Image: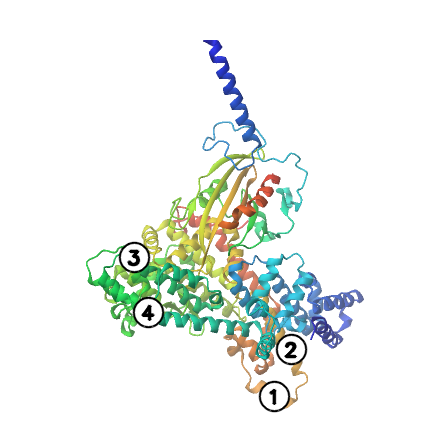
Amino acid sequence: MLKKVIPILIVLFVIGGVLYIKYSQKSVAEPVAEQKEQINLPADSAGLKKNSNAVSQGFKRFTMDEEYFLCDIPIDWEFTKTNERKAKKGVYGLQVVGPRMDDAPTIAYVTFYLKNNIYFNGYNDFIKRNSKDIFGDKKNETDTYGPVEKIKLNGKIAYRLESEIKEYTEPETKSEKFIMLREKFYVIPSEKGFHVLHFMSSDPSYSKYLPVFEEMVYSFRGV
Amino acid sequence: MTLKFTKKIAFLAMIPLMAGLSFSQLTPEDVKALDSYTKEISLANPVIANQFLDDKSFIDKIKISSLTVAAQLISKAEAINDLSNLLDNRLYKTKEYELSKALQLRIDNNKVLTTIGIGPIPETLIPWVKKYKKKYSASKVSLIERAIRKYEVVVSSKPAITDKQRRDKVNWERATIKERNTILAGRADKVLTKLINKDSRTSANYQDALRSIKKFKYLDASGQARFTKYMAQMSAVEKAKASLNTTQLAQLDGQIIEDQMRLLGNIFDQSDMNAGAIETKVNALRQSRMKETINFQENQILIPLLRTAMEKEVKGTITGDKLLKFYKANKLNIAIAPCQNCNAKFEPTNNRIVFDSGLIQQYMRIRGITTEDLEGEEINNLAKYLSPMLIHEGTHQMQHAWAAKNDIYKFYTQEDEIEANSMEALYTLEKLEKDKEFSSLMKKMRSNSTYADKRIKFAKRFQKNTDKFTSAIRQTYYYALPSFASSRAEILKAISDELIRRESLDATVLGDIEKYGSSVSEVMSMTSSELISAVGDTKALVLKKVQSDLLNSEVYTDHYNGAEDWSESMVILALAGDSPSMGSKVPALK
């Protein structure tokens, strides 16, 4: 009996090991443990670059004031930092704007919200406001909100959410002009507040520019 | 005239002004710095222009030495800075029209930028972009070329061969962006009108063919609204056809679109068929019948009822209470009238808020009610529906009252819309969160009313990323509207030029201006473009008063920044269970 069980156990162990290695080396694209907060997530380095000091070609490193975070940003994209008035409201962030495609913007934001920021009551509030429509629905005639996935990002617990939303471009006129925006967020709680990495673009250009955003995500380190 | 040559002239023109400075007030270092700033600003250098504007203590020194020189330099530096900020913004392909409108406001005859070599010929912008904005991608430069309506991009990429083609090209290249846009919009509108009034086709293929007509992107705002409505009508007709029998289908044959909509409305009314959503869609898009049109007498009865109902509706909300406090000391005067391409507007000249009669009539058609039903509960529902616009336009009324109270000249800018839109979004958000009837009404209306859908989506945008709402408004929705900095620069330049011109006028002419020229009260009610056109006929003291107002820009920026801070600080409260009237504390700004 024991002789029959041992090979099965070995096979299961090997499969388990392969799966573990696969997921621990995979980028942030896969959830580690969805909706199982109480379970210890693997202390791996999902998404972490092998050499965290190396800056990829076409990127440069940016360090936010007070060293609230650092990350690599694409050199060719237009960069803007939040102003002093925003800092007084507990927000430090950057915006990088990429090529406009398919009648929609391509933008990545990295923002740090201090605990006393005036906009959100913590990271849960941010997730709540960005994971459902205004009536609390995950889907309506024009908008779709994906699930909130708990993952491990660069060694820290993070929440990943995606959505596709219809946005009118002229709110005051009678025009019905609109764009379809796809958005992706990583929300990372920290002791001093929480970080949000946010990407948006039109649907067709989403897959084209997502790798640029993911490079920012991989290089991201927060306080 | 080349850009380089124009800029040299601009610099030389500054020398006599600088000679007029009282140099005793300035140290040799200051004089050197002024010389350097003047030179670089006359070259339209955006980095130095920004640096100069940040150098407040230096500007104060120049102001003491010569207010005119200071005003001219500030005006030029702000115009460069504003142009630079506009182009640095994210520019969407879809916003080509808005970018073009924004550029036509800045690059035109007699604008500040023309004195430093940018405009009125639109192509003068491109060398500046290539010199100072080297990081811009090729697609961004191409978008800018489309926005200035470069001949090769919007008219013909082929070389002009015939005399007529060459003449057309020369004339085109002499035109300003505004003139080019007017020509393009006129051509597109002509095609659209012909289609609406003569064509009866509505098929999906035909709709696709119309969507791909590039000419229609040049339509002006009202043309775009007509095009959107036309497309929606064709789509509704196609969907409605599935519910019709052969005889009914035959009635539509060969009819132009408005007649098809009218006939469909009649067919649905007269038959027992229940076409459901498509019947409501047809009713939303067709023209109003007699009983759905508000006549003069009904208008007069409706206005006081609606005013009272709207005051009741907004009461108890964060923004509503702020507005009602204002209306304790100021009159709320509303009207129902056609508003062209808008849902509502505030008219400063007669201090009233106009709600679009077309919007109200569409509301009645969607809900299946007539003017006779507009009383009691139906008035309250209408007030709910329109209330976000009361907050928006009421905010504009408060802005005008604030300017009057501070006795400063008020002109319409992007910052006004940032405040009004933040107030509106905050209100809608709070109502959707706390008022079930409001929420239910807007939810029901959104699938047939773009107005309702926009209010909901706008509130959602504010709720999602409150800290990025201001820049989204500035960069996405109101490109074409000048910013405070841009308008201020234009007005200061016009006044400074005029004051210099007057130094060489003879006493008789000056006397006439002082006797018959525009007074303070007349100027205070002028728009910025009206004032710029009227500086030559305005009394000197009035010009100096406006100049003084604008040179103390903190009065304006403190107001706008304060308004933005207030709206942003209220979002958590708006989403919380308690309203301020229930005793919640308003969070203080950190």
Q: Label 1 vs label 4: CA separation?
A: 62 Å
Provide the chain ID for the residue under circle 1. B
Question: What residue sits right under mark 1 in the picture?
Answer: B511
| Residue type at the position of mark 2 | Asp
Count neighbours of disc 3 (C-alpha within 10 A) and say few if under 14, some if 14 to 19, many if 20 or more: many
Count neighbours of disc 2 (C-alpha within 10 A) and say few if under 14, some if 14 to 19, many if 20 or more: some
Kindly report which numbered mark, 3 or 4, lies closer to the viewer in this rendering.
4
Residue B356 position, x and y percent, is 37, 67
Q: Label 1 vs label 3: CA separation?
A: 69 Å
Question: What residue sits right under mark 3 in the picture?
Answer: B278
Disc 1 + disc 2, Cβ < 8 Å: no
Can you tell which mark lies on residue B497? Answer: 2
Q: Residue at x 78, y 71 (%)?
A: B24
In the picture, measured across the screen, residue B58 lies left or right of residue B209, that is right
Q: Are marks 2 and 3 on the same chain?
A: yes
Picture layout, residue B472 above or below residue B519: above
Question: What residue sits right under mark 4 in the picture?
Answer: B256
Count neighbours of disc 4 (C-alpha within 10 A) and say few if under 14, some if 14 to 19, many if 20 or more: some
| Residue type at the position of mark 1 | Gly
Q: Are marks 1 and 3 on the same chain?
A: yes
Q: Residue at x 42, y 45 (%)?
A: A132
Which is more N-terminal, label 3 or label 1?
3
| Residue type at the position of mark 3 | Ile
Which is more N-terminal, label 4 or label 3?
4
Residue A46 position, x and y percent, is 57, 33
Q: Out of A208 and B472, give the one closest to the viewer.
A: A208
